[in-house]
Image (cartoon, rainbow, N blue to C red):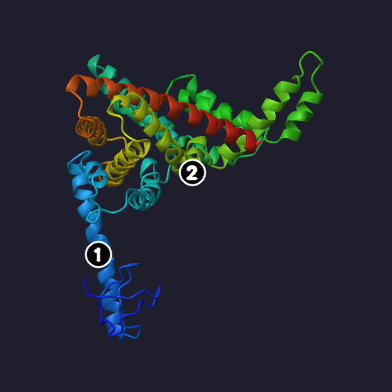
């Protein structure tokens, strides 16, 4: 790496210690001249960047291809070639939480609405196939035209949400009249009714006004009113496009970061006979999570932008990724803890179960906390 011009003086400008050659033996700072040319400054900066870049790939390659080896090398003192585990985890996790959440959701239209339309088309197609099998080819084109017209004439969910209460009533009545002769619109009608109820109790004030018109026996009690207030707040956010899943995704970095030391503790307990320090287990866990993040950074955009999230190819890639994660975890545990195949598999199963339970519990806590603070 290009270092620039070294000073003739032997005093360190950083700590004042005596410098024998080019680097201070006390603080490690290079004994360089303070003044340098513009191009010297640029070349020096680029050299530092590619030095980091080189160390990154020196760490990345064995981290992905030799599960557990980087951790063994790091704990054995072979650290000059590798990036610090925490530094690499922070860098990779930042990229992960920028790339992966965006690659896990649909594009312009909501995933739920797309599924509804797909259901309608599937039902129409099924009807056409049944009719064709019965030999009624002369009416196939008529049924197809009617089905397509009905699907195209329906108001989309996003448009329906923006209608007034009276306009929603009219749209529901119109859809019900169509549904008398066909079940193509059954799923969409169910969604219309759900958002129509939300519109009816669009605010807590409107809900209380409706409650005031009811008899004493029909009115909600204190607990029901409290829960209704929370539901109205959540529904208002849902109408505007908010989803709990998206909100939870904002807390993923903190959740994974806090669960990492817990996962290391599980591994320490399950592999306690190896008599390793907790920090050793933690470094092993950090390297494992970093490898997982890198795999997701690579595959998630491919599944969305190349093949589509709901495609058979993306589902196949998901299966391959799952198998690769299981294989990686097995190989890393077997190498690092030096256990037999059967013992490694059994203990890996225990780790996965404990981590899955913890993941579900913490996600439930996060969702309930979000609901609490929303209301």
From what the image shows, is residue 57 above or below residue 359?
A: below
Instruction: Kindly indicate the quadrant of the structure image that contains residue 332.
Output: top left
* Few, some or many residues within 10 Å of mark 2 (<14, 14–19, 20+): few
- Is residue 271 toward the left or the right of residue 249 in the image? left
Going 49% across and 41% down the picture, which residue do you hit? Answer: 251
Q: Are marks 1 and 2 in contact (CB under 8 Å)?
A: no
Label 1 sits on residue:
51
Q: Which mark is residue 197?
A: none
- Is residue 124 toward the left or the right of residue 219 in the image? left
Going 22% across and 50% down the picture, which residue do you hit? Answer: 78
Label 2 sits on residue:
250
Residue 316 pos. (x, y %)? 22, 32
Residue 303 pos. (x, y %)? 28, 41
Q: Secondary structure at mark 1?
A: helix
Q: Nearer the viewer, mark 1 or mark 2?
A: 1
Q: Secondary structure at mark 2?
A: loop
**In terms of sequence position, does the residue under pointer 1 or pointer 2 come before the other?**
1
Viewer-side residue, 343 vs 175: 343
Residue 164 pos. (x, y %)? 64, 39
* Few, some or many residues within 10 Å of mark 1 (<14, 14–19, 20+): few
Marks 1 and 2 sit apart, C-alpha to C-alpha, by 33 Å
Viewer-side residue, 241 vs 94: 94
Let me know if residue 139 appears in the view: no
Residue 136 pos. (x, y %)? 26, 17
From what the image shows, is residue 163 above or below residue 194?
A: below
Going 77% across and 29% down the picture, which residue do you hit? Answer: 208
Q: Quadrant of the N terminus?
A: bottom left
Let me know if residue 43 appears in the view: yes
- Is residue 25 toward the left or the right of residue 374 in the image? left
Q: Quadrant of the C terminus?
A: top right
Instruction: Kindly indicate the quadrant of the structure image that contains residue 210.
Output: top right
Viewer-side residue, 159 vs 285: 285
């Amino acid at each position: 790496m290009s270092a620039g011009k070294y000073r003739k003086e032997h005093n360190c400008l950083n700590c004042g210690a005596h410098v024998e050659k080019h680097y201070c033996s006390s603080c490690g700072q290079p004994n360089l001249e303070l003044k340098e040319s513009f191009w010297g400054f640029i070349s020096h900066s680029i050299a530092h960047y590619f030095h980091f870049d080189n160390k990154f790939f020196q760490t990345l390659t064995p981290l992905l291809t030799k599960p557990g080896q980087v951790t063994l090398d790091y704990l054995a003192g072979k650290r000059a070639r590798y990036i610090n585990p925490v530094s690499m985890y922070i860098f990779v996790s930042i990229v992960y939480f920028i790339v992966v959440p965006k690659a896990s959701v649909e594009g312009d239209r909501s995933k739920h609405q797309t599924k509804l339309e797909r259901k309608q088309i599937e039902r129409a197609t099924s009807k056409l196939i049944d009719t064709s099998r019965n030999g009624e080819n002369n009416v196939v084109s008529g049924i197809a035209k009617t089905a397509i017209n009905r699907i195209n004439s329906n108001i989309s969910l996003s448009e329906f949400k923006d209608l007034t209460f009276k306009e929603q009533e009219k749209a529901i009545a119109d859809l019900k009249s169509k549904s008398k002769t066909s079940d193509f619109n059954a799923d969409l009608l169910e969604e219309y009714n759900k958002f129509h109820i939300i519109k009816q109790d669009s605010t807590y004030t409107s809900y209380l006004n409706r409650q005031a018109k009811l008899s004493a026996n029909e009115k909600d009690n204190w607990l029901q009113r409290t829960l209704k207030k929370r539901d109205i707040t959540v529904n208002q956010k849902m109408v505007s496009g908010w989803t709990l899943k998206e909100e939870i995704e904002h807390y993923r970095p903190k959740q994974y970061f806090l669960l990492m030391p817990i996962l290391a503790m599980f591994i320490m307990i399950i592999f306690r006979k190896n008599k390793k320090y907790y920090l050793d287990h933690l470094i092993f866990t950090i390297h494992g999570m970093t490898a997982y993040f890198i795999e997701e950074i690579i595959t998630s955009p491919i599944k969305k932008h190349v093949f589509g999230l709901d495609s058979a190819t993306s589902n196949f890639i998901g299966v391959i990724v799952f198998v690769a994660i299981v294989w990686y975890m097995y190989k890393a545990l077997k190498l690092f803890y030096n256990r037999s195949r059967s013992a490694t598999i059994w203990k890996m199963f225990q780790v996965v179960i404990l981590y899955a339970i913890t993941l579900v519990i913490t996600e439930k806590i996060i969702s309930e906390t979000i609901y609490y603070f929303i209301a």
